[in-house]
Image (cartoon, rainbow, N blue to C red):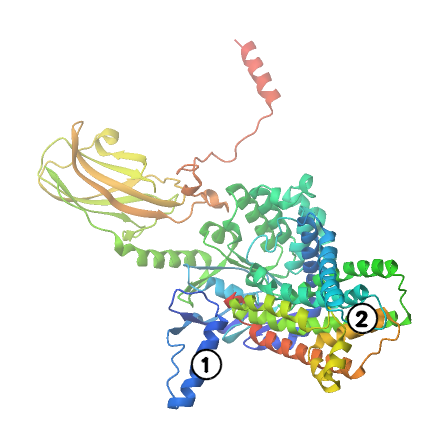
Amino acid sequence: MHELLIEAGRSERRYWRDLWRYRELLYILAWRDISVRYKQTVMGVAWALIQPLAQMIVMVIVFGKVAKLPSEGGAPYALMVFAAMLPWQFFATSLSSASSSLVANANLVAKVYFPRMVIPIAAVVTSFVDFLVAFLILAALMLWYGHPPTWRLATLPLFVALAFLAAIGPGLLITALNVKYRDFRYVVPFLVQFGLYVSPVGFSSTVIHDAFGETAYLLYAANPMVGVIDGFRWAILGGDIGLHTGVVAISILLSVGLLALGIWYFRRVERTFADVI
Amino acid sequence: MSDVAIRVEGLGKRYHIRHETGPRYRSLREDLTASVRKLLRHGGAGPTEDKVIGNEEDFWALREVSFEVNQGEVLGIIGRNGAGKSTLLKILSRITEPTEGRVRIRGRAASLLEVGTGFHPELTGRENIYLNGVILGMTRAHVRRRFDEIVEFADVKRFLDTPVKHFSSGMYVRLAFAVAAHLDPEILVVDEVLAVGDAEFQRKCLGKMHDVGKSGRTVLFVSHNMAAVKSLTTRSLVLDGGRVSFVGPTGPAIEFYLHEALRLGADTRAERFGRGLHTSICSVRLLDGAGGTAHIYKPGEHLRLEVTFETDGQSGLSMEALMLDASRSNLALASLYQFHGQTLPTVAGTYVCILDFAPVWLAAGQYSFDVTTSEINANWDHYVQTAVEFTVPFSNPEDRAWNFMQSYGYGALALLCREPTVMTPVADVRSNRENKQLDP
């Protein structure tokens, strides 16, 4: 017979099994957010397309045309920007929607038990659906520019997984901080805005490498999105683009580290969510 | 031992409360400035008292709570607001962790602390059934299996594909309860869910709860609705100030609870007794069965008022009692002379009398009596407004589960039919009538 023991600090031991048991909740929360969004916005799916497209156009004009930065491996500048825009947009929406997710679902947290981690993860999954939709634009752009993918595209799922990894860690961290400190929500948009320009989205990371040298480039990779973006470009654009394995390794290590930190902090604060929220 | 479904041992929950009226969450700015200040102070004047949390205080919402619930038992939990009922349920539902003690639960448990948790207004009825079901802990496969039953119970078939924001509040609540009612757990924890919805719906829910209890499932039922607690549970637990103050059969538990509640609320009544021209009413009290002072009245029992009065022996005096409801509308009149032809004694002195009224099926709510002496057919002599107040805690004639409350606005008196009401097919009546017409 199913037996349950509730006492202080006890929830630790069952946590991961519970998280697995509640995978249907994860699925249905993500589905709810997606279907609600596509029902509410008049433009529906179009919204997931317009946002990255508009940003790409601005970046192409500012960095490509005005600043005349070089593209990577001879790929069209727009394509190069968009290949980076995909993971970045995913990362950014993951962070911002995860950060507000628990507060937005406060009624659930106060009334039903489930591993709280389900909520921010569902928010990340929701962003992932937008990410998939935006892939359609990439396909269209590649057709438009007559830039066919190479065998490297087959490695893309690995970098998608890395993007996921990179998004969930900080997502959990920010979610937990946002419950504890409600004014943290002012910090998130800033981080996202700032990150867009700090990460090599509008320009190639080789620009950094060429201007500041190898060491600076490796330091630059302390932003885990650098490895993700480089990987995306390498896999999508093909051609003679190189992939710096050191940078990718740093990105993986940092993402795993941030994930561990995120889980640790989230778990630590989680117990008090229902009392605080 | 083996048939204990829930065992609670020494359970306690402590909260930190802040005395400011500020928000419960912290602000990053506050914490940062506090730690910077601490750092600066540390660098300068050495160890100083850290009084940042000086305005916080520990508060035990629950303390040393222990009880057991047997397999298949329906246990009621009653207590005033703030007695710790919600905290207990939250711990049992694993929403929050206890500070001390432990709970052992044998069997799949589900809790229902709210009807319609997670309902989304933009989604259709069909979508919300799945969403809410999964949130409450069902699998989608389970919801799919019970889907038709849920829809039928909720009676919303035609609106299944309409966003619930267009639902009437009645439909909304029905749908929400229908999902919850088909959870099928072995142990069900229910909180005040029945406080929502109209009387009709409450009756339906109570009926369903009854079935759940009868099907051998263990139920923990928290409610302010004493009629529901009484009808659904056999044993109850009374919480007071975070501690268990009574565990036992539901009847005595409710009695204990009401007694405590009224003892605490009774001392606020002001005395306004003066005197009339010939008489003076000294005191009025409602009597319980043993002749003690009562503040509650259980419909179906004799309603007895004890009036102590003085008279100067004047003839032609009567006594009246006017019963009023919570809104101070007149409900009923008692008159010694007009109804019974009796007058007050014509020998001066102090008297005590008991007005022993036949049972009245009052609705649950607040009532009061104005008691007065009068010169028959002339005027009141000593009129005492709100001479006595009393509460009808619940009203469920014939022990039906529905609590008939004054606040529903259906009136204050239950009109009871002789049972059973015989239903005769109309055709027969007509033929009877025809027969009768033919008879003479």
Q: Which mark is residue B415?
A: none
Residue pictured at 52% horizontal, 35% vertical: B420
Q: Chain of mark 1?
A: B
Q: Is the N terminus of chain B in the top left, top right, bottom left or bottom right quadrant?
A: bottom right
Q: Is residue A88 above or below residue A32?
A: below
Q: Residue A172 placed where, x, y %? A: 63, 71
* Residue bearing mark 2: A71
Residue A209 higher or lower than B361, as above or below: below
Instruction: Tell how many labels.
Output: 2
Q: Amino acid at mark 1?
A: Val
Where residue B256 sits in the image (x, y, percent)? Answer: 38, 59
Residue denoted by label 1: B36
The image position of residue B51, as x and y in percent, is 38, 80
Q: CA distance from mark 2 to mark 1?
A: 46 Å
Q: Is any part of residue B105 visible from this angle?
A: no
The answer to which quarter of the image holds residue B330 is: top left
What chain letter is assigned to the residue under label 2? A
Discs 2 and 1 carry the same chain letter: no
From the viewer's perspective, is residue B401 above or below residue A217? above
The residue located at (76%, 81%) in the rendering is A210
Q: Residue at x 37, y 39 (%)?
A: B360
In-image side of B200 versus B47 (left or right): right
x and y, in percent, of residue B171 in the image: 60, 43
Residue at (69% x, 50% y) in the render: B127
